[in-house]
Image: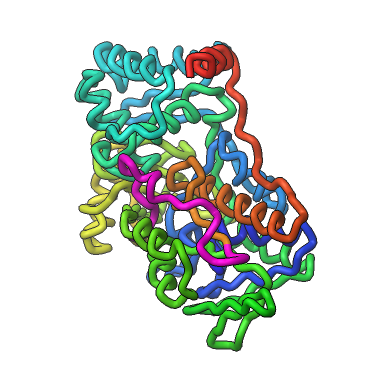
């Protein structure tokens, strides 16, 4: 149940293992929160938000390889930070070993003062040591102890890291912030490289549909499942739907936590159901907003950029990233993370604000004509990784027989990302295989630290 990344990853892994899978999705398309649609206001197929992956996302990359779409991901190790007024600071790896590979470009960056750089250096040094996984300290409290400057807070922690985890720094668990820093900036240049789809997400995930159907499995679109019954005598599940009952020996619930909470009262009574219900109550979602703009001329030759000191945070030049679109002018997508105040704007207000701020970074916007624009709100974009959240993240096991859980909010060790979703799907698929007595491994191993980080990892392991 559930055709998001978690459900697709589980279904495709099990189909590869030779099982006949039925993937039930309430919508008419796959992808869940990472999907695309035809926007009626602009007449264009757009993604519900710009989704990126990184080199450290081994399970998402493995899922893409499995369904044959890995070649549709465009990779880069370069990033450009832009200040209002247009001054740019390119960042990228060098020949130095990890974790020093980005040091030359960081030291040369004009976006940070010397004081900012010293403060960030102190913080990164502190993160070289392991952070206890059960720490209940917030990132904001830790940064206060590390005496971070205003520039370091606003131009790095509140922008880059808060965007990655899509929450305010005071609402972010320190262990998850530390994980993001180590994976994206310290372990290796490969781990921090960024990948972007060169096709709409709906087209990207069409590969999962083809993969399943080619192996005798199926996707049941427009299928809403509101209850499930366990037949102990037949050792199987029956799920009534609007188009008829679906039966199966095993059940994987790959649902967002709100949908899981709604389904829970309609599941068979079971020991542990109350604990799961309690865990679900501790989760909350944070929104992400995106503004899509079409101009009559080119406003920048950059593929993407980090925009400083304004409400819009990230620029993706979709006209360049999606060359098949054959845009005559420019099509850009602007992303606002942790966007509760921005989400309160109307579409017209959001477009006007985005155009005004974009002109501060790219002067060509002032002379360009805005042909059309749209705002997309993904209210349930990510779940919050607040301090202590791991106590409310269940494993793939469930209170019911032959039933397993998947979803980015389950216990994957990762924050709310497509990688967490893919990992949860692979863990659930492994649990099903163990249930039939045919153990299989689907979980992809993490990228190993490189350079000097290998020595740091060894030293930390010994100290632990």
- On the image, the x and y values in percent for residue 360 come to 26, 38
- On the image, the x and y values in percent for residue 98 come to 54, 16
From this view, report whether residue 66 is shown above or below residue 108: below
From this view, report whether residue 299 is shown above or below residue 107: below
Would residue 329 be visible to someone looking at this image? no
Left or right of 448 on screen, residue 169: left
Left or right of 40 on screen, residue 365: left
- In the image, what residue occupies the spot 46% across and 65% down? 271
- In the image, what residue occupies the spot 60% across and 55% down? 428
Majority secondary structure of magenta residues: loop
Task: Please check the rendered image and state whether residue 72 is part of the magenta-colored stretch, yes or no.
Answer: no
- In the image, what residue occupies the spot 30% across and 35% down? 136
On the image, which quarter does residue 262 sit in?
A: bottom left
- In the image, what residue occupies the spot 66% across and 49% down? 64
Task: Please check the rendered image and state whether residue 389 is part of the magenta-colored stretch, yes or no.
Answer: yes
Q: Nearer the viewer, residue 343 or 433?
A: 433
On the image, which quarter does residue 129 sit in?
A: top left
Display coloring: rainbow
- On the image, the x and y values in percent for residue 257 come to 41, 61
Q: Nearer the viewer, residue 15 or 400?
A: 400
- Indicate the quadrant containing the N terminus: top left, top right, bottom left or bottom right: bottom right
The part of the chain drawn in magenta is 379-403
């Amino acid at each position: 149940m559930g055709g998001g990344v978690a459900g697709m990853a589980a279904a495709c892994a099990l189909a590869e293992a030779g099982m006949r899978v039925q993937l039930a999705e309430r919508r008419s398309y796959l992808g869940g929160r990472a999907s695309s649609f035809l926007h009626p206001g602009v007449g264009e197929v757009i993604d519900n938000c710009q989704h990126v992956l990184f080199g450290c996302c081994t399970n998402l990359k493995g899922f893409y390889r499995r369904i044959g779409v890995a070649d549709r991901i465009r990779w880069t190790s370069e990033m450009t930070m832009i200040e209002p007024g247009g001054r740019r600071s390119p960042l990228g790896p060098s020949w130095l070993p990890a974790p020093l590979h980005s040091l030359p470009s960081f030291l040369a960056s004009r976006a940070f003062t010397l004081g900012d750089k010293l403060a960030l250096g102190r913080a990164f040094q502190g993160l070289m040591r392991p952070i206890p996984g059960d720490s209940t300290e917030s990132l904001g409290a830790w940064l206060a102890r590390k005496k971070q400057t205003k520039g370091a807070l606003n131009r790095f922690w509140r922008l880059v890291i808060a965007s990655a985890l899509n929450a305010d720094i005071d609402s972010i668990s320190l262990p998850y912030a530390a994980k993001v820093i180590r994976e994206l900036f310290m372990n290796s240049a490969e781990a921090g490289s960024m990948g972007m789809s060169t096709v709409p997400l709906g087209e990207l995930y069409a590969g999962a549909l083809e993969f399943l159907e080619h192996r005798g499995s199926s996707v049941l679109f427009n299928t809403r499942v509101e209850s499930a019954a366990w037949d102990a005598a037949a050792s199987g599940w029956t799920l009534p739907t609007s188009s008829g009952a679906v039966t199966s020996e095993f059940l994987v619930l790959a649902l967002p936590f709100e949908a899981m909470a709604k389904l829970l009262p309609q599941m068979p009574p079971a020991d542990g159901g109350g604990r799961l219900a309690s865990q679900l109550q501790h989760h909350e979602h944070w929104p992400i907003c995106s503004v899509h703009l079409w101009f009559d001329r080119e406003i920048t030759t950059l593929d993407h950029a980090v925009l400083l000191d304004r409400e819009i945070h990230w620029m993706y030049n979709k006209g360049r990233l999606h060359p098949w679109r054959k845009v005559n002018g420019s099509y850009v997508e602007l992303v606002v993370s942790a966007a509760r105040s921005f989400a309160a704007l109307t579409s017209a207000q959001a477009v006007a604000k985005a155009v005004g701020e974009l002109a501060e970074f790219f002067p060509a916007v002032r002379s360009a004509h805005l042909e059309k624009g749209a705002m997309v709100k993904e209210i349930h974009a990510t779940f919050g990784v607040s301090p202590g959240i791991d106590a409310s993240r269940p494993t793939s096991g469930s209170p019911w027989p032959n039933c397993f859980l998947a979803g980015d909010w389950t216990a994957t060790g990762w924050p709310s990302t497509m990688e967490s979703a893919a990992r949860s799907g692979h863990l659930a698929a492994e649990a099903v295989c163990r249930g039939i007595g045919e153990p299989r491994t689907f979980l992809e191993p993490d990228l190993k630290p490189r350079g000097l980080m290998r020595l740091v990892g060894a030293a930390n392991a010994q100290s632990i």
